Image (cartoon, grey):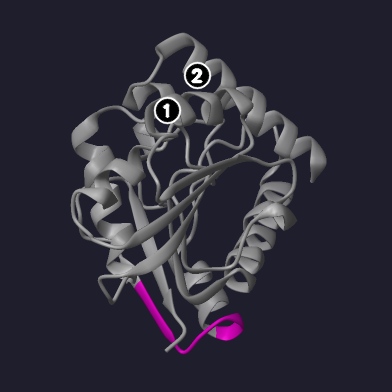
Amino acid sequence: MNEIYKNIGEYYSEKISTYGVTPEGVDWNGEASQYLRFVQLLKIAQKDQFSLGDLGCGYGKLFEFLNQRYKGVNYYGYDLSSEMIAEAIKLYGEESNAFFFHIDILDNIDCVDYMVASGIFNVKMQHCEADWLSYILQTLEKMNEKSREGFSFNILTKYSDKEYMKDNLYYADPMFLFDYCKRNFSRNVSILHDYDLYEFTILVRKA
């Protein structure tokens, strides 16, 4: 698993170095789709004041989005790329409710009300599907462990158009992940697969 973490950190460090503080710098294709993903992920939150951990936070754009819509949110951003965290601190480091951390392993994250992850399961690079799925499931276990009230994540869907699918990306089975979350984490699990992107979002509520 350490090799996967290392490869992810290097991949996103290269992206931010190439594209800077832009959606492309975190490997998204534009701001509109980035915001649309945020809207889906934040459907996990069921109150106005909460703490939220953003696993794979990039340069912290979700914090800005949150701060414009909620009052009393404490945000904790974690990333495997030290370059990403450095950019996040430049942008938001003086905010009293934003905290950013470079991590090497998932154990180094705090317990929060909600945990979210956007895009961190998509780019499998050279890793085989079995190893990548193991990484996904271990990460979900950690998100469950570190969230008091629930967590949400998005991932590319196997229902993507075949002609646009790429070998270095991972396309997940929504039914498999729904079933896994339902059996292992909570009876309250939702799939959002209706927002016109080639992905889906899963919400796991603990209450």
Left or right of 191, for residue 107 = right
| Residue at position x 57%, y 75% in the image | 180
Q: Looking at the rendering, in which quadrant would you find the C terminus?
A: bottom left
The residue where tag 2 is placed is 15
* Mark 1 neighbour class, 10 Å CA radius: few under 14, some 14 to 19, many 20 or more: some
- What amino acid is at disc 1? Asp
Q: Residue 189, relative to residue 25: is it above or below?
A: below
| Residue at position x 36%, y 22% in the image | 24
Pick the residue in front: 165 or 142. 142
Residue furthest to the top in view is 18
| Residue at position x 28%, y 52% in the image | 66
- Label 1 close to label 2 by CB (< 8 Å): yes
The magenta segment is: 183-190
Q: Residue 41, relative to residue 77: is it above or below?
A: below
The residue where tag 1 is placed is 27
**Which element type, helix, strand or loop, lies under badge 2?**
helix
Whether 82 is among the magenta residues is no
- What amino acid is at disc 2? Lys
**Mark closest to the chain's N terminus, 1 or 2:** 2
Coordinates of residue 124 in the picture (x, y in percent)? 61, 37
Q: Residue 119, relative to residue 200: is it above or below?
A: above
Coordinates of residue 148 in the picture (x, y in percent)? 52, 77
Coordinates of residue 79 in the picture (x, y in percent)? 58, 39
**Which element type, helix, strand or loop, lies under badge 1?**
loop
Left or right of 8, for residue 187 = left
